[in-house]
Image (tube, helix red, strand yellow):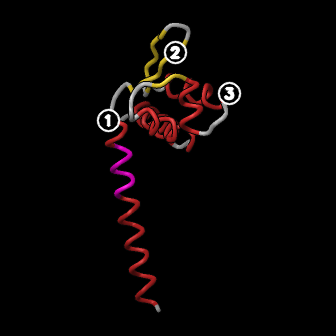
Amino acid sequence: MSAAQHAAVSEFFAVLSEPSRLVLLQALHRGPLTVNELVAASGLKQANVSKQLAQLFDARLVVRERDGTSIRYAISDPMVFSLCERVCHKMAKDTQYEAAIFHRRI
């Protein structure tokens, strides 16, 4: 990969490094939601939800569509959930490995 490609991949993962963005993505996994619905689903403040959605939109992880007076957000590419599942699977394996080592030391 080129330096520019490394930088782009790094920026993509940086977007996913914010826990509140992961909470919003998880809420959107069930289907499109408005900002108010995301506030209710996430427990985050409206200003924070709007800020994080802007970041997700800029990273092209969500799309938005006007729905009357509201804007409805949706996942642009469900690939993000496959990526999150792989990361969670790796973390679970690492936790099992660490637990096994800990139990052997006792």
Neighbor class of circle 3 (other Cα within 10 Å; few <14, some 14-19, many 20+) is few
Q: Looking at the picture, how far across and down is residue 91, in whole percent?
A: 41, 60
What type is the residue that disc 1 sits on?
Answer: Met
Q: Looking at the picture, how far across and down is residue 70, in whole percent?
A: 54, 13
What type is the residue that disc 3 sits on?
Answer: Ala
Tag 1, which secondary structure?
helix
Neighbor class of circle 1 (other Cα within 10 Å; few <14, some 14-19, many 20+) is few
First in sequence, mark 3 or 1: give its number: 3
Find the residue positioned furthest to the bottom.
106
- Answer left or right for 72 relative to 84: right
Q: Indicate which disc residue 79 carries.
A: 1
Alpha carbon of mark 3 to alpha carbon of mark 1: how far? 27 Å
Q: Quadrant of the N terminus?
A: top left
Q: Indicate which disc residue 34 carries.
A: none
Check if mark 3's residue and mark 2's residue have beta carbons within 8 Å. no
Q: Main secondary structure of the magenta part?
A: helix
Q: Is residue 100 above or below residue 67?
A: below
- Residue drawn where x is 45% and y is 83% of the image: 102
Q: How many marks?
A: 3
The magenta segment is: 83-89
Mark 3 lies on residue = 47
- Residue drawn where x is 55% and y is 44% of the image: 19
Alpha carbon of mark 3 to alpha carbon of mark 2: how far? 15 Å
What type is the residue that disc 2 sits on?
Answer: Ile
Neighbor class of circle 2 (other Cα within 10 Å; few <14, some 14-19, many 20+) is some
Q: Looking at the picture, how far across and down is residue 13, in whole percent?
A: 47, 40
- Answer left or right for 20 relative to 48: left
First in sequence, mark 1 or 2: give its number: 2
